[in-house]
């Protein structure tokens, strides 16, 4: 193997050998854009005249495995998700440095999904399909995830403190969320990053759910609230991923899961999601500024912090009885 794939390191050769043996030949490779914590490559591999279209994911230098989880654990989660009925790409081979999976055709760029005519028929279906997919995620066995359920407010409070950055709006949000925390009777597998941008979409709707690196145990409504965070609407008006309404999401989820969704709890988790995204923006920027990974993309994420502060102030100014 030669050419641009040399930059991917020895993990590439290990992955190809593990999946197909020494006779495999890489006939096409392209590093895909995006991915602040992982590198992603599209590959075509020929084995005895048969072409295999694949995706290779690798850890990037400076990535925090403790915060994001290992790729080996992510592969295990994706296999469990497939068994639970979640649409996911098939894992071909995996180890700590990499995941090699089948390449699923479709679109992942949110602005195209929300605006291109090719997805016009899919858009009215997506919120309901998200509800059905999340119901399947929350059916996954708890043992699919390492670790125990943690207090999300305490967890992200600690993360913000470690940044040593002052953000009064975030402090206000923490206090308000602590004072209005909803009851949480259920513990399930939580995807942790289920949103527009981590879905492969075709003209008929969702084809695959991606990026399982933040999966953990928690309240299932956390996933629904994260999907509704304003950042994942990408300038579109509908509150669920920019493509649908709260009712479409909730009714499909309730029907597929058999569990009711409290609308006040959904707003709480949406607010928490905006706060979490703001802290993530701070963290990603500091990775660049402190030398963990020099990246224009990471540096540019810093401008999103003020956007999340504005979104938080709007959510926190709404009446306490307001619901999505």
Image: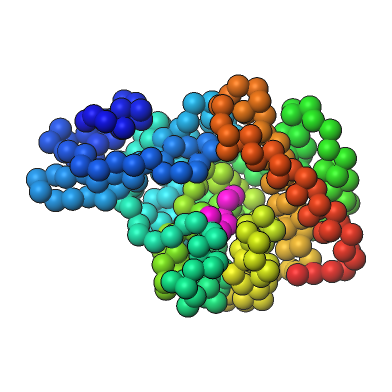
Q: Which residues are magenta?
A: 192-197
Residue 81 falls in which quadrant of the image? bottom left
Location of residue 67 in the rendering, given as x and y in whole percent from the top left corner: 59, 34
Residue at the outermost left position: 48
Q: Is residue 194 magenta?
A: yes
162 relative to 13 in the view: left or right: right
User: In the figure, is residue 119 to the left or right of 225?
Assistant: left
Q: Is residue 240 magenta?
A: no
Q: Quadrant of residue 24?
A: top left
The N terminus lies in which quarter of the figure?
top left
Where does the C terminus fall, quadrant-wise?
bottom right
Q: Residue at x 80, y 48 (%)?
A: 309
Using the image as rendered, state which of residue 285 and residue 271 is in the foreground: 285
Residue 59 falls in image quadrant = top left
Query: At x 47% / y 78%, what residue is drawn?
Result: 121
Q: In front here: 306 or 244? A: 306
Report x, y in % for residue 293: 56, 27
- At horizontal 56% and vertical 27% (from top left) the residue drawn is 294
**Residue 143 visible in the picture:** no
134 left or right, relative to 263: left
Q: Nearer the viewer, residue 64 or 132?
A: 64
């Amino acid at each position: 193997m030669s050419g641009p794939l040399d930059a991917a390191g020895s993990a590439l050769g290990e992955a190809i050998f593990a999946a197909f043996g020494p006779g495999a030949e890489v006939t096409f490779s392209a590093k895909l854009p995006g991915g602040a914590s992982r590198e992603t490559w599209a590959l075509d591999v020929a084995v005895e005249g048969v072409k295999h279209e694949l995706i290779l994911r690798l850890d990037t230098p400076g990535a925090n495995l403790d915060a994001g989880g290992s790729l080996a654990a992510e592969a295990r989660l994706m296999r469990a998700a497939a068994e639970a009925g979640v649409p996911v790409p098939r894992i071909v081979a995996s180890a700590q440095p990499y995941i090699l999976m089948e390449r699923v055709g479709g679109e992942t760029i949110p602005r195209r999904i929300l605006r291109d005519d090719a997805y016009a028929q899919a858009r009215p279906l997506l919120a309901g399909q998200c509800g059905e997919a999340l119901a399947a995620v929350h059916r996954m066995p708890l043992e699919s995830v390492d670790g125990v359920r943690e207090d999300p407010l305490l967890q992200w409070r600690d993360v913000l403190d470690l940044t040593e950055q002052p953000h009064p709006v975030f402090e206000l949000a923490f206090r308000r969320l602590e004072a209005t925390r909803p009851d949480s009777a259920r513990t399930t597998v939580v995807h942790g990053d289920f949103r527009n941008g981590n879905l492969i979409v075709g003209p008929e709707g969702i084809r695959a759910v991606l990026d399982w690196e933040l999966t953990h145990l928690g309240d299932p409504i956390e996933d629904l609230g994260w999907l509704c965070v304003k950042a994942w609407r990408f300038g579109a008006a509908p509150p669920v991923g920019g493509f649908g309404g709260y009712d479409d999401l909730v009714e499909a989820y309730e029907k597929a899961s058999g569990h009711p969704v409290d609308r006040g709890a959904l707003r709480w988790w949406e607010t928490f999601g905006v706060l979490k995204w703001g802290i993530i923006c701070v963290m990603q920027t500091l990775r660049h500024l402190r030398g963990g990974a020099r990246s224009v993309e990471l540096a540019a994420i810093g401008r999103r912090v003020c956007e999340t502060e504005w979104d938080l102030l709007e959510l926190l100014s709404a009446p306490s009885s307001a619901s999505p």
